[in-house]
Image: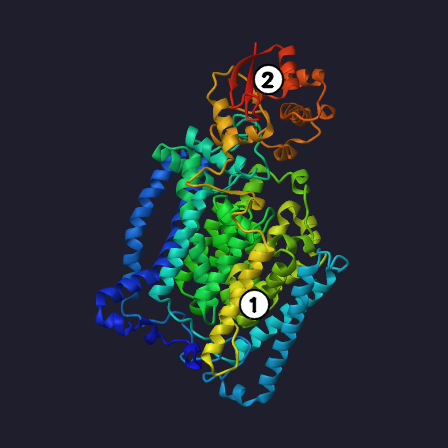
Amino acid sequence: MSMTDQVATSPAAIDEPSAFGRSWPVVGRLGAVVAGLPAALTDGAVLVFALWTLLYHAALPLGLAPSWTFRVWLVTSLVSALLVPLIRWRHRRGVPADPVGAPDTMDAAPDATGSGPASGADPAAARTGRTAVARRTLTVLVLVFGTIAAVTAGLAGTPTGADLTWWVPASAGTTAATGLVLLAWRTRRETAAIRPPGTTGWQSAYALLTAGGAAAASLILARSTPDDIYYVGRSVWVAERDDVPLNDFLFSENVLPAMASQPPIASIEVLAGALARFLGISAASATWYLLLPVMAVLAVLALWRLVQRWAPRRPVLAFTVAIAFLALVCGPDAALGNFHLPRLYQGKGMFVSAVVPLMWLYLTRWFDDRSRWGLLLITALSITATGLTTTAAIVLPLLVGGAGLMMLLVGRWRSALAVGAAALTYPIGAVVVTQLTLGSANEAAADVNFYDAAHTYRRTFEVGIVGVIGGLALWCGPLLARRGSPALLAAGGTVTLSVLLVPGVLEWLSALTGISVVLWRVSWLFALPALIGLLCTVWLPTRLSAVRALTGVVLAGAMVASFAAYAVPMWDERSGVLVHDGPTWKIRTKQLAIARFVVGLDRPDGLVLAPASIMRTIPLLTTRTRVVLPRDFFLIEYDLDSQFSQDRLLVTRFANGGPAAQRPAAEEVGAALKRLDVGTICVYSQNRYARQTGEEFGYTTFASRRADPPVHPNAVTCLRRG
């Protein structure tokens, strides 16, 4: 690629059709439509889901049925889909095309390092050799300290760096981040920004095809997670009862106090339940067969739009590397790939995979043009984030704060205040109102787990060579972002996360807020996949375009090969994922079959006791069958030492079976069964102790699920209270 290819295209060139488009107008118009589809789909989805969240929150105090709210939302969305394009078209008529509202002078510098000529830069700055030398020196220092931070952070926790203190990467990373801020600030003041080139039809077509592939993959990949008991279970309640459970719906019939750690702010599960009721299908099918593929498309397109806006060159290659990172770096813990296709239907997965890149994109556009439409999208996205997860109230202030800091540094305090109010008012307000009306989160629940800075980094960025690549993206990636707002905001994200990763900072936030269990999610504020993709857009000072292009391809290939060799891919069983031949529910086949068998029985009144994995599955099918222990983690909300909790843990251990030394005494089991009002006991047929103990306390066998052979571990025997 020649040097002239790196210069930002003028607005006229962006809008001018190609020679092929001029010869074939229909093809040209089709290409323009395809080029605009990613923006239309993602922006439209943000607006309609924000509308749903507003309607849902308005309906809560009124006690309106979700089915009614859903119909109002559906009609309003359809009308808006017709009116909004018309209004925007009329508004744009007669307005000169300027995609970012940047100055007319164009900057030919290829990246934020200041390498290469800057034909549109301030002549006074260009004549000052000392300025260029200072910029290059600062760039070298950022690269040195950023590399030290990346290498030491990636090695910390491995056998090679077992004795390495976290202060080394934290100190080096903070130094590199400070240098990035100074470099981005000076570059912004001394030179004009590079306008992003318009998206071409073939680029958008590639992104759309990739998104379609992700949607198809989401249907056949199945990862059963304990969190589904709440997220999908809430949708099941809404679908069956046309009511939003404001109290506990897992241990009781909407009677016990609701879990303080799960306030009814999120609207995505209610949407899934209302959709299922509207279509007459199960909530699980609506979630996994309808909403999940749509979410996959939107998440991929959101990432594409950010990469296309921030990449100084080779956006398609950078996007491919970013997608490869998500697909190949998954594993059983908390890598970002783990929260993509395997868990997009959980609001937190959609938040980190789609909302975060879109927020960085919208902030970049707002910083460039300050349009009312851009501010509206930022506001709508903040409402959307609130409807997805309460994590938004933790991550968004940090994300927007980092961006606002950079706006303040370049004298854009009005922009910083406006975007802060637009992006933070709703999520923070929703949490405050909820806490005032429902009470504060349970401290015992909040303090179950806490991950310090080192563990927070490892959970998201991984360790070893993958962790090193993630560190390079964090501390060096902003150097490669497009000059102007992208480089400035990327530096803001880096310095914010670097400060949070200093030892003691997360501990202080934990003591201040009492949200220890989710503080590790602060790392989500950084658009890591996009910055990893930018690593292959490095520029070399050579006139040989083939060498520059080959360098990018080699870097991309090396990173993808590292992900494949040193990480666990999304479709691996080590990631907890099973690959099926066709669309499937995200439940293990064995557990689903047994749960359906239990639900279909003619049972007496009372709770159902079964092995823990089966009791976690039944609420995903129906809320009419109440189980003893939906999930043991939620007992923290009800005091683990209480009789309420201890009885449930004891009889679950009894139903699970196991070595004789771990079996609870029969007398304790009998007393707990009576206190809990257990009407049905279903255990694996091989669990003779449970069957015999149940019979001792008046339970009789009334149903069996045979397997081949009869002693197969999947065979189940059910006893009912006499």
Which residue type does callout 1 highlight? Gly
Residue furthest to the right? 163
Residue furthest to the front? 709
Instruction: Tell me if 473 is positioned left or right of 17 in this view.
Output: right
SS for dot 1: helix
Which residue type does callout 2 highlight? Asp
Number of the label disc, if any, that sits on residue 209: none
SS for dot 2: loop
Q: Nearer the viewer, mark 2 or mark 1?
A: 1
Q: Name the foreground residue: 150 vs 160.
A: 160
Q: Whole-percent x and y of residue 394?
A: 58, 51
Badge 1: residue crowd in 10 Å (few <14, some 14–19, many ≥20)? many
Q: Whole-percent x and y of residue 344?
A: 48, 47
Give the labeled residue for mark 2: 677
Q: Name the foreground residue: 316 vs 632.
A: 316
Q: Whole-percent x and y of residue 419?
A: 49, 61
Q: How is the image coloured?
A: rainbow
Give the labeled residue for mark 1: 477
